[in-house]
Image (cartoon, rainbow, N blue to C red):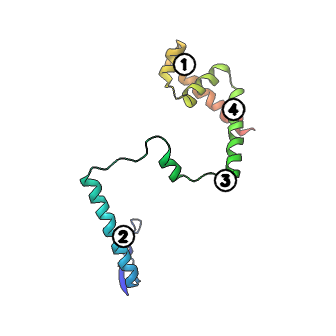
């Protein structure tokens, strides 16, 4: 049996917590620590601080599992409620919220496109979001 301090392995421990572990477990923990430090050193030496994701979704597909049918149905319902709430907004607010959140336009770009002040766009979006919040709470 070998004594190990959990404080060295887990950052949320504030005091020393000593545990007896088997030799095999201690050996595996030590091997893992050595492999991890070797990986960090290789990353540092080769300046490999980048992701392998080429924006074609390979990495995201691997990291995130497919959603269940129940989750898909819940998302569909919430999307429908969102669209229903947007349809009940005034036309200007709905158009500006759609441009900002769905099309990714900045508020300044929306203001330039509509030939209005940026503050008016900002306030319109803010009021529209408050109305949507009220509508979604009462659905």
Nearer the viewer's eye, disc 1 or disc 4?
A: 4
Q: Which mark is residue 111?
A: none
Residue assigned mark 4: 83
Residue assigned mark 3: 68
Nearer the viewer's eye, disc 4 or disc 3?
A: 3
Q: Position of residue 50 (x, y in %)?
A: 35, 47
**CB under 8 Å between discs 2 and 4:** no
Residue most extreme to the left = 45
Nearer the viewer's eye, disc 3 or disc 1?
A: 3
Q: Quadrant of the C terminus?
A: top right
Q: Residues within 10 Å of mark 4 (few under 14, many from 20)?
A: few
**CB under 8 Å between discs 3 and 2:** no
**Mark 2 vs mark 1, CA separation in Å:** 57 Å
Q: For mark 3, give the secondary structure.
A: loop
**In the figure, residue 86 lies in which quadrant?**
top right
Residue assigned mark 1: 120
Residue assigned mark 2: 32
User: Which residue is pictured at 37% across the width and 71% down the height?
Assistant: 7
Q: Position of residue 23 (x, y in %)?
A: 37, 84
Q: Quadrant of the N terminus?
A: bottom left
**Mark 4 vs mark 3, CA separation in Å:** 23 Å
**In the figure, residue 28 lies in which quadrant?**
bottom left
User: Which residue is pictured at 51% across the width and 25% down the height?
Assistant: 105
Is residue 85 found left or right of 52 in the rendered image?
A: right
Q: Residues within 10 Å of mark 1 (few under 14, many from 20)?
A: few
User: Which residue is pictured at 31% across the width and 61% down the height?
Assistant: 39
């Amino acid at each position: 049996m070998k004594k190990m301090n959990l404080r060295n392995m887990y950052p949320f421990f504030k005091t020393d917590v000593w545990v007896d572990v088997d030799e095999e477990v201690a050996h595996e923990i030590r091997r893992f620590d050595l492999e991890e430090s070797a990986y960090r050193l290789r990353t540092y030496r080769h300046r490999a601080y980048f992701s392998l994701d080429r924006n074609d979704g390979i990495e995201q597909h691997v990291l995130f599992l497919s959603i269940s049918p129940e989750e898909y149905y819940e998302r569909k319902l919430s999307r429908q409620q969102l669209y229903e709430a947007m349809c009940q907004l005034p036309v200007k607010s709905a158009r500006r919220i759609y441009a900002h959140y769905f099309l990714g336009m900045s508020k300044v770009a929306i203001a330039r496109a509509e030939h209005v002040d940026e503050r008016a766009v900002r306030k319109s979006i803010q009021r529209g979001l408050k109305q949507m919040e009220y509508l979604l709470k009462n659905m």
